[in-house]
Amino acid sequence: MHYGFIKTAAASPSLIVADCRYNCDRIIKTIKKANENGVKLLVFPELSITGYTCDDLFSQKLLLDQAVEGLMDIVKASEKKEMLIITGLPLEIEGFLYNTAAVIYKGEILGIVPKTHLPNYNEFYESRRFKSAPKENTVIDIAGKAIPFGTRLIFQNTQMREFSLAIEICEDLFVPVSPGSVHSMNGATVIANLSASNEILGKSDYRRTLVKAQSGKSICAYIYSNSSDQESTTDMVFSGHKMIAENGVILNEAAPFTQEYIEADVDLERLVHDRRNQVSVREQIVDNRYQVIPFSMNKIDMEISRIIEKHPFIPKDTHILMERCNQIFNIQTAGLRKRIEHSKSKTAVIGISGGLDSTLALLVTHKAFIEMGRETSDIVCVSMPCFGTTKRTKDNARKLSKLLNVDFKVIDITQSVKRHLFDIGHDGITTDTTYENAQARERTQVLMDISNLTNGIVIGTGDLSEQALGWSTYNGDHMSMYNVNTSIPKTLVQHIIRYVANDSKGRLKDVLSDILDTPISPELIPAAYGEIVQKTESIVGPYELHDFFLYNFMRWGFTPKKILMLATLAFENDYKTEDIKKWLNVFIRRFFTQQFKRSCSPNGPKVGSVALSPRADWRMPSDASFEGWMKELD
C-alpha cells in the first residue's frame, strides 16, 4: 500500500471439476505469483476449490471433506503472506450445505461468508443443494478453530482503515438490492464477488454494466472473479470473465475466454474522499449487526502500475473527447440562452482579445443567439488595444468577429489608461501590478458601460484554471454578468475551440486554428518588435500542470505529497520533479490566497465534476492558512 493504493487481483486458474487437490495446487501457485507481484487482495471464483459444476456430487461427503482439506492447504500456503485471499468452497454446517467464500490471511481463516441469493431458474438450481445464508452472524468450527460465519462481516485493516472488505457471491450482484450495496452503506470500501456466471449472448455486457454501476453507486472498489472455461460444459459454458472496477470505472478486465489473471491498483483515498462528500451513501441503512474483523497489514511502498493521466480533464479517446466537447458547448449555450431570455437583454457584450477564452465565449454566445432566432449583430464585440496588444491578436479578434457577423468595435484605451495612471500618481512607465491592472479594469468599465448603453449584459470569459490561480484582476476581468467559461479548465478550452474549428470551413477554420496556436498572454506589457513578451505560463507555470494539480486537489482531496508523486509519474518525460514541486508550491499559495476573488464570482454553468462556484461546489474562507499544506509538501 502506498498513498492509499492497494494492488488487487482476480484469478480463475485452470481446474478439474471435483478434483480438489489439483484445483488447490493451481490456487496456491496463483497465490505465490500474486504475492511476488505485491498483490494485497486476491479473489478467486465461486466454489473454486471444487468447481461450480459438481451438481449432485456436492452431496458426497468425500468431496466436502476434500474441499475442507484443500482449504487448509491454502491456509497453510498463505502463512507469512500479507495478502487477503478469497476463495470459494461448499461447507456443511449443522446439517445444511452452504455456498461460501473463505477469507484467508497469513495462515488464518478470518471469516466465512455464505451466499445469500441462490439462483433457481433456467439452467440454475442451487436451491436443490444449498441453503441461503442465515439472517444473523454466528460462529462455526473449522479444524478446531472458531470462525465468524455470516454475511454481515467486514474485514478491516487496522493499519489502513480505509481498506475495508466485504463479500458477495455471484447472484447477490444481480438482485435489485444487493448485499454489496448494504455492505458499502455500512463501511465496506472494497467488495469482492466470487462468481460462476455462464456465458451466453450479451451476458458479458450485462455483467460489465452491473459491475460499473455497483462500484459507482456504492463508491467502492469491486473485484469480480468469474469461473474458468474449464468448468463442466454439460449444459453451460463459463468464460473466466474478470473485472476490477473503482467508482464506476473499469480499471482492468479479462474479457471472456482470455486471461486467467488480472491485476489493478485501487486508490482507496479516492473512494474515501467521495464518501466523505456524499453522505447519502452511508446514511440510508446502518445495521448494527455488522461485525468488523480486524487484520493488520503493514503499509508498504509499491510500484504503481496504474496509468496516471497527464490531462485528467481530457479523455484520451478522440471520439469521447469530441462528444464531451459537444456536451459542454451545449451546456454553456443553454445557460447563456436562459440568462439572456430571463434578463430580456437586447445585446451581449464581449471583450474580444483574440485569445482562447474570449474566443470560446464568443462562439458560445453566437450559438445561443442562433438558437434563440436572434440577429447576431446584437452581439457587441469590443477590441480594446492598449500597451501590450499585438497585431496578431488584434487582427484575429477582428477577423473572427466579422466572420460571425457580429457588431465589432475598436476602442483604444491607451490614452484613458495613461490619463488614469497620471491621475493616481503613477509614472506610466513602470510595468508593475498597477500598470497591468489599470488596463484590465479600464476594459471592464468600457464593457459595463456599453452594456448599459445597449441594454445588454457583459459575458465573462475567465476560465476555471484562472479562477483556481486567481489569475484575474479583481473587479477587472474578474467581473461580468454571466461567465460561460467559469467551470472549464484551460486545457479543455483549447479542445472545445478545436471541436468548433473542425466543424467549420474556410476562413473561420483558419482563424480559429491561428488563435489556438497563439501563446497564452494577458498582453499587458508592451510587445517587443510586435511579438508577445508576457507569456502567462512562464509566470504562473504550465496550465497542464495546474489543471492536473486542480483536478487531484479538488476532485479527490489528495495531499500535496500525493499530488507531487502522481504528477512525477504522469509527467516523468516532460518535467523534472523539482520543477513540478515549484509549480505545485505556486498553485497551493495562489489557490489559498486568491479565494476572495472566487467568493464573489459571477454566475455561470457548471459543466464537470470540478467547479469553484461559492454557491455550489466550493465554500472556503478567504483567510484560510495554507501552512499545513506547504509543510506537508516540504
Image (cartoon, rainbow, N blue to C red):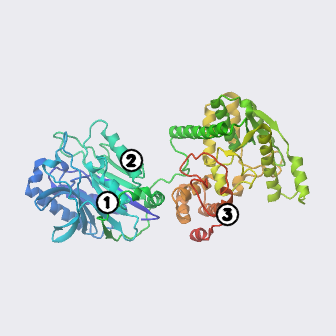
Whether 254 is drawn above or below 278: the answer is above
- x, y percentage for residue 35? 33, 63
Q: Which mark is residue 116?
A: none
Amino acid type indicated by mark 3: Thr
Residue depicted at 81% across the width and 36% down the height: 409
User: Helix or strand or loop: what does disc 2 sit on?
Assistant: helix
Residue placed under numbered mark 2 in the picture: 213
Proximity of marks 2 and 1: CB atoms separated by less than 8 Å: no
Query: Relative to residue 523, is residue 566 drawn left or right?
Result: left
User: Helix or strand or loop: what does disc 1 sit on?
Assistant: strand
Amino acid type indicated by mark 1: Ala
Amino acid type indicated by mark 2: Ala
Residue depicted at 51% across the width and 40% down the height: 320
Q: Quadrant of the C terminus?
A: bottom right
- x, y percentage for residue 333? 62, 38
What's the CA distance linking mark 2 and mark 1?
Answer: 17 Å
What's the CA distance linking mark 3 and mark 1?
Answer: 43 Å
Query: Relative to residue 221, is residue 400 drawn left or right?
Result: right
Residue 404 visible, this angle = no
Residue placed under numbered mark 1 in the picture: 166
Whether 72 is drawn above or below 614: the answer is below
User: Helix or strand or loop: what does disc 3 sit on?
Assistant: helix
What's the CA distance linking mark 2 and mark 3?
Answer: 39 Å
Q: Which mark is residue 593?
A: 3
